[in-house]
Amino acid sequence: MIKPTRYERIAFVASPGVEAQQALASLVKTYGNHSPAKADVVVALGGDGLMLQTLHQQMRSNKPIYGMHRGTVGFLMNEYRSEDLYARLAAARDTVIHPLLMRATDVHGQVHIHHAINEVSVFRQRHQAARLRILIDERERMPELVADGVLVATPAGSTAYNLSAQGPILPINADLLALTPISAFRPRRWRGALLPNTAFVVIEVLESDKRPVAAVADHDEARNVQRVEILSDKTISMRMLFDPGHSLEERILSEQFNY
């Protein structure tokens, strides 16, 4: 086999599951293994959780990430095959995504800064619903939302928690963000909004002492927040690789017709 020079050096990462570890051993034996710093591409073996973890780890490296499904949920992964990996990598199509930047200030004035690839969520911490005020580009758009919470999702994350919360599915190349309430009590009929991905979203917590709220960027959590600022971080571009005909764009489109 002639190895394309484009992705000759591969770094393999795998989740701890049996299937992923068996695949890792087989692939390393066939293709070798490089450190991510010296590799041309990172191949992730597992499910969507591992893909998100790998994207976070490689967020500023500009390394393309190619996932193969050896886990539970595999929406972000390609089909697993051990043969012809060099050819598959050479033929793969790029999808570029930008993370969200969350800046959350808690009731003690401490600032928590994290990135999210899927979504930033604001949740109630106790039995009482959260009371939230929403501003878009420094203009108040909702003086009070009473709900379990609210989230801002990227197109890549629109089929994850956002979809479970009845939010819209966004095409991966859409310049949009989804603002979706979580079990809204008041106003009951509000189903959220579509925002340009240039929007600066601010969520302020009302009655934070009585109704404490947490903010979560993918898996990074800040407790007892008072104010959460969210925007798309265009300074970071991450490259995901997908087999032809199996692109993230195609899967997001197909997801809209699954009922």
Image (cartoon, helix red, strand yellow):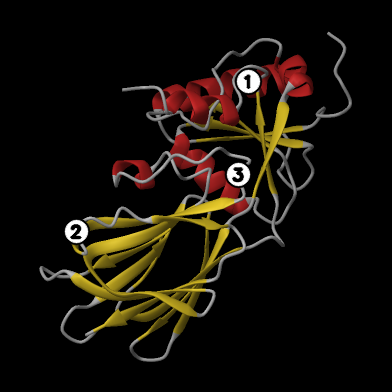
Which is nearer the N-term, disc 3 or disc 2? 3
Q: Which mark is residue 42?
A: none
Residue 160: % across, % down: 40, 41
What is the number of the mark on residue 188?
2
Residue denoted by label 3 = 174
For the residues carrying marks 3 and 1, which lies nearer the camera in this image?
A: 3
For the residue marked with disc 3, what is the amino acid? Ala
**Residue beneath the point at 79% across and 43% down:** 38
What's the CA distance linking mark 3 and mark 1? 35 Å
The span from disc 3 to disc 2 (Cα, nearest Å) is 28 Å
Task: Give the mark toward the camera: 2 or 1.
Answer: 2
Task: Choose the circle earlier in sequence order: 2 or 1.
Answer: 1
Asked if marks 2 and 1 touch (Cβ < 8 Å), the reply is no
Q: Nearer the viewer, mark 3 or mark 2?
A: 2
Whether residue 69 is visible, yes or no, is no
User: Along the horizontal axis of the image, is 184 left or right of 159?
Assistant: left
Relative to 179, residue 161 above or below: above
Task: Name the residue type under label 2.
Answer: Arg
Instruction: Specify the quadrant of the image occupied by residue 250.
Output: top right
Question: Residue at label 1?
Answer: 27
| Mark toward the start of the polypeptide (3 vs 1) | 1
